[in-house]
Image (cartoon, rainbow, N blue to C red):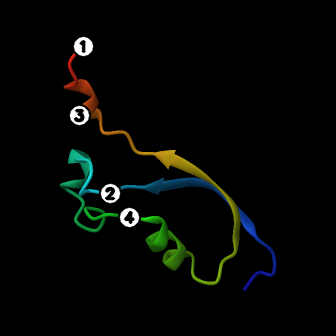
Amino acid sequence: MIDFSIVDAHLHLWDITKLNYPWLNDIPALNKTFSLDDYNAACGNIKVGKSFFRNALNFYRISTLPN
């Protein structure tokens, strides 16, 4: 285990109960909600001191919004 914290430069979180992400349909391993709690569990013993959160846009929903 490393004894210093890291910077996670690319982080995605999504909630499939709130938004539809059609690109997840063909990827069963990812077609589920991935929350901050899930992220923290996946980090295990790695200390993340800072991170960059990337918002996964829902292009379908955005493209169908009224003008």
Which residue is label 2 attached to? 15
Q: Which mark is residue 61?
A: 3
- In the displayed orientation, state which residue is furthest to the top: 67
Three-letter residue code for mark 2: Asp
User: In the drawing, does residue 43 fall left or right of residue 35?
Assistant: right
Q: Is residue 43 above or below residue 30?
A: below
Three-letter residue code for mark 4: Phe
Is there CB contact under 8 Å for labels 1 and 2?
A: no
Measured Cα–Cα span from mark 3 to mark 2: 14 Å
Closer to us: 40 or 3: 40
Measured Cα–Cα span from mark 1 to mark 2: 26 Å
Image quadrant where residue 40 sits: bottom right
Instruction: Give the mark nearer the N terminus: 2 vs 4.
Output: 2
Q: Which mark is residue 57?
A: none
Three-letter residue code for mark 3: Arg
Secondary structure at badge 1 equals loop
Q: Residues within 10 Å of mark 4 (few under 14, many from 20)?
A: some
Q: Which mark is residue 34?
A: 4
Place of residue 28 in the rendered image (x, y in percent of width and height, measured from the top left): 22, 65
Is there CB contact under 8 Å for labels 4 and 3?
A: no
Foreground disc of the pair 4, 1: 1
Measured Cα–Cα span from mark 2 to mark 4: 6 Å
Three-letter residue code for mark 1: Asn
Q: Which mark is residue 67?
A: 1
User: In the drawing, does residue 50 fall left or right of residue 38?
Assistant: right
